Each structure stands twice: as structure tokens, then as C-alpha cells.
Image: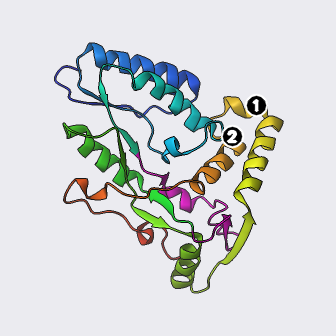
Amino acid sequence: MEGATCVVSVLAGLHDVIVERQKVLLEAAILAAIPKFIPSDFSTDFTALTPGENRNFDLRREFHQTLDVAPIASTAIFNGAFAEILTYNVPLLDFKEKVVGYWENPDWHIDFTTMDNTAAFTAAAALDPDTPKSLRIASFQVSPNDLVAYTAKTFGTPYKLVRLGSLEDLRAYNKRERAAHPEGENELYAKWQQSQYMQSMFSTHHETLDNDRYPGFVWSELEDVIEPR
């Protein structure tokens, strides 16, 4: 680590990785007198969410309890959801059933950032000697109604907009599913964890963006992620 100015953690896993191993990485950065640490967050801004409603975010919140008092500067990168999930046939955009599903509000804007945009912005932040505690980015922000309009333009026929319930319905469902499937506690992306991500996406979004912090960036658009089929 000699000569490094920042450590960027890209660890992925459960408590043993996100909390325990990341602490080891943090301690190594401090011992090497590296001035800044970027934790493996890369997610929705979980500081705006209620603890206990997203297991994977709770692990990051626990790690931050150590990071926030450590003798090293740190910056969290909040990029919302990775835009690539829109190609995974998720409830929000179901290609098989030709449905756009939503909870609570069809005009709620969701933050999406491509992996490439996230990586490039993180690299710039790592080289920036004066970053704040958190940076919020999004390649684009779209609502379920926006997705319906996009399917009409791109596929020729609009997908059906379907209300899947209220946020309280989704919250209750996730609690039931987590209790019913304790084996998921040992799985990084248990089905109930995937549903918790949906709940988080419809619960908070960026009110302001730091997209313009570094000049010369070309941010991806929805059209770059979902192509005509």
C-alpha cells in the first residue's frame, strides 16, 4: 500500500466479509497511513432507511459504526441500484409478462447507476483529496410510469402498469418471508433479501446528485441499458 492515497473496498458478502474482513482492510489502511477509505457500500443511501428493513444494508451500517470513529477520512458512494438489474426480469420490469410493477407510487423516481459509471466516479473520488462523507450519483432516475412510456417507445407496445401493493404490504411480506426462511440468513441474495432491495428502492431516493463534481463524465441513459427486443 506504499504511496497509495485511498483504499477502495469492493468486498461482497455477509457479516464475516462486510463487517469483519472489511475491518481488517480498514486497519491495514490505517497502519499504512493511507489518508482515505471508500467502503463497499455502492447502494441506495441506507442512512435514510429504517434499520432492520434491509439485512445487507444493516451490515454496512454496522461497519460504519467502526469506520466513522476510525482515524482515517472516508467517503461512501451511494449510487442507488445498479442499472443492470433492469435486464434481470425483476418485478419492476418483467419482460416475460410485459408488466411494469410498482409499490405505492407509480411516479416515484428510482436511482439507477451503471456499474461502469459507478466504477469511473469512484476512481475519480479516490483521487480527490477533499471528498465529503458521502457522494450521491445516478446515471438516470426513472419512475414506473417512465418505464411504461419507454416500453411503448422501444418495443412498440406499452407494458401494463400493475400496482403490486403498498409499501406497508411489501414491508409486511418481507418480514414474513424472512421469518419463514431462516436459511436465507446464510445467503447473500436470498429471495427475501432481493425483495428487501425492492422495498428500499421505493422508500428513498436521492434528492440531489453529485454527478457534476468531476467534469467530463458521460453518464449512461436508460436507452443504453435496455435495448429494443
Numbered disc total: 2
Residue drawn 63% across and 63% down?
92
Task: Specify the farthest residue to the bottom.
Answer: 156
Residue 44 coordinates in the image, percent (x, y): 50, 48
Q: In this image, 24 relative to 51: left or right?
A: left
Residue drawn 43% across and 35% down?
40
Q: In which quarter of the image is residue 175?
A: top right
Residue 100 coordinates in the image, percent (x, y): 65, 70
Is label 2 in a helix, a strand or a loop? loop
Residue drawn 41% across and 51% down?
115
- In the foreground, 16 or 202: 202
Find the distance from the CA under tag 1 to the CA under tag 2.
8 Å
Quadrant into which the N terminus falls: top left
Residue 5 circle label: none
Task: Tell me if I can see residue 38 in this picture.
Answer: yes
- In the foreground, 117 or 59: 59
Local packing at callout 2 (Cα closer than 10 Å; few below 14, some 14-19, many 20+) is: some
Q: In this image, 215 relative to 11: left or right?
A: left
Q: In the rendered structure, which segment of residues is drawn in magenta?
A: 78-107
Residue 116 coordinates in the image, percent (x, y): 36, 53
Residue drawn 63% across and 61% down?
89
Residue 183 circle label: 1
Q: Is residue 80 magenta?
A: yes
Q: Which amino acid does label 1 sit on?
A: Glu
Residue 167 coordinates in the image, percent (x, y): 70, 56
Marks 2 and 1: in contact by CB < 8 Å? yes
